[in-house]
Image (cartoon, rainbow, N blue to C red):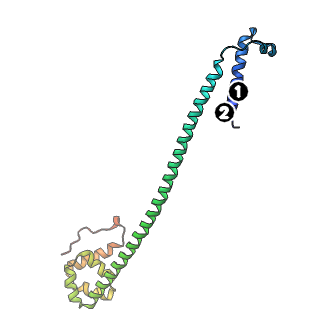
Amino acid sequence: MRVSVLHVVAVGLAVAGLGKAMALVPGGTIPDLAAFASEPAPAQCSAPEELLVAITQERAALELQHQALADREAEAELARTALLVEAARLQDLKTAVETLLERAAAAHENDVGRLVNFYRGMKPAEAAVIMDDLDVEVTVLVMTAMQERNAAPILARMNPVRARAISKIILERSKLPGDRNLTGLRLK
């Protein structure tokens, strides 16, 4: 049930009037209200004025609270809108990054394919000389991308220490990082 301000004022005035009436009557009972109607009214009744001032102050405080709540709701809506805009921007950025990563992966795959073709086109002895001095990661990458029938003659002509290291690295790559055992690995 919703109580309006008028209801509160009416009840307050009734209670105040009843309280004054009880104070005027000896014994605390109200005999006949008609008798009070014939008596002159007191010069000034301060209780209703005080109640009116309190109600006015309460209305002002309620209006301030209502305005503060409306301001907070507006700020929350603005923040929601900003979050939606930011989420859309981040989604666009994510899509752009994923596209770039796909392009980079495709370019990397193409580059590895070209290197494989270069080394496959060489004589195994020539490819082995180059791979002996090549970075280990690149050598492993190229050797694993090559077909075994092309990689085997190159691996056979490489420095034996390096060939063993490359073989060990290729074997250990498929294991989980904690399970890999590359201790004692020599490259030259």
Dot 1, crowdedness within 10 Å: few (<14), some or many (≥20)? few
In the image, residue 176 sits, relative to residue 115, either above or below, namely above
The tag earlier along the polypeptide, 2 or 1, is 2
* Residue nearest the observer in this picture, 53 or 132: 53
Above or below residue 161? Residue 90 is above
Q: Position of residue 39 (x, y in %)?
A: 76, 12
Q: CA distance from mark 2 to mark 1?
A: 10 Å
Position of 20 compared to 109: left or right?
right
Instruction: Name the mark on residue 182.
Output: none
Residue at disc 1, secondary structure: helix
Q: Nearer the viewer, residue 134 or 186?
A: 134
Q: How many discs appear?
A: 2
- When the figure is inspected, residue 104 is found, relative to residue 115, above or below; the finding is above
Q: Position of residue 69 (x, y in %)?
A: 54, 42
Q: Amino acid at mark 1?
A: Val
* Residue at (70, 12) in percent of width and height: 23
Residue nearest the observer in this picture, 172 or 50: 50
Which residue is tagged 1?
A: 11
Q: Nearer the viewer, residue 154 or 135?
A: 135
Who's the residue at 54% across and 47% down the image?
Answer: 73
* Place of residue 20 in the rendered image (x, y in percent of width and height, measured from the top left): 70, 15
Marker disc for residue 5: 2
> Residue 55, how many percent across, how many down?
62, 29
Q: Quadrant of the N terminus?
A: top right
